[in-house]
Amino acid sequence: MKPTKLLLALSVAVLCTHNSINAQPSFRKAVTAGISTSHPHSGDHLVEGEIFDRFVGGEIGVKGECVFPQSLYLSSALSISNRGWNIPVYLDNNFQTSTWECDVYYLEIPLFVGYKYALSSKSGLFCELGPYLALGLWGHSRLDVDEDVPSNESKNVFQDGWYRRACCGARVNIGLNINQWQWSMGYSYELLKPTKDAWSTIINPQTSSLYLNVAYFF
């Protein structure tokens, strides 16, 4: 083989190898934590004004990113999140009300498709969206009726059959990467009504939530 052809063949081989190496996705993992504010929605007449109070919760967990060429990536996480609600409920025909409170915890597993836009070699913007699966861990509900009447209480709404053990929804996040740190804000909406049986006929706390999160990548 002539030297020019050999050199051309080696150049093509090196170029192909270089592109193949560059095409390999990179993976990184992080710990993440954040706060959330949930706004449940209801269509039931037993709810005064059909308005839930906003509920402040949070989430903590681990996440991973698989980054591909052209700034595309896949992201998933394993986190414990807290959502809930407080709502005024009519107790009698005299319009006496009490507060019905519920506080629930989920194991959430999202799957996002995202895009990164580099601002510099150490910083960039990103946007990601996708579905999530939420598995109920534990939750507490309490309705104070009267000082002389015991409270209507459920120490685990999942075990007692008032809440679905599995739920799902959609979420979108936007944020900023700087070195190993990531700051983001997000919005999610539950696609399934979480209550069941008797609760599903009187209350529908289908939740939309806003998030502020920070993550540190290793």
Image: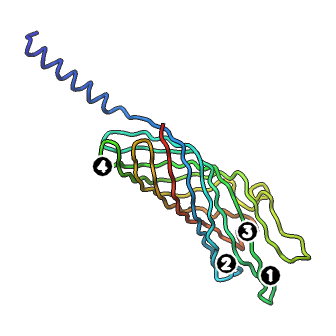
Callout 4 crowding tier (Cα within 10 Å): few <14, some 14–19, many ≥20: few
Quadrant for the N terminus, please: top left
Question: Which mark, residue 119?
Answer: 4
Q: Which residue is mark 2?
A: 44
Q: Amino acid at mark 4?
A: Leu
- Which callout, 2 or 1, points to the residue nearer the camera? 1
Q: Which residue is mark 1?
A: 91
Q: Amino acid at mark 2?
A: Asp
For residue 19, what is the image quadrant? top left
Residue at disc 4, secondary structure: loop
Q: Please name the amino acid that badge 3 sits on.
A: Glu
- Calculate the distance from the C-alpha at mark 2 to the C-alpha at mark 4: 48 Å
User: How far is the residue under mark 4 from the one under mark 1?
Assistant: 57 Å
Mark 2–mark 3 distance (CA, rounded to whole Å):
16 Å
Q: In the rendered structure, which disc, 3 or 4, sits on the residue that comes first in sequence?
A: 3
Q: Mark 3 highlights which residue?
A: 101
| Residue 20 percent across, percent down from the top left | 30, 28
Q: Which label's residue is closer to the chain start, 2 or 1?
A: 2
Q: Quadrant of residue 69?
A: top left
| Camera-nearest label, 4 or 1 | 4
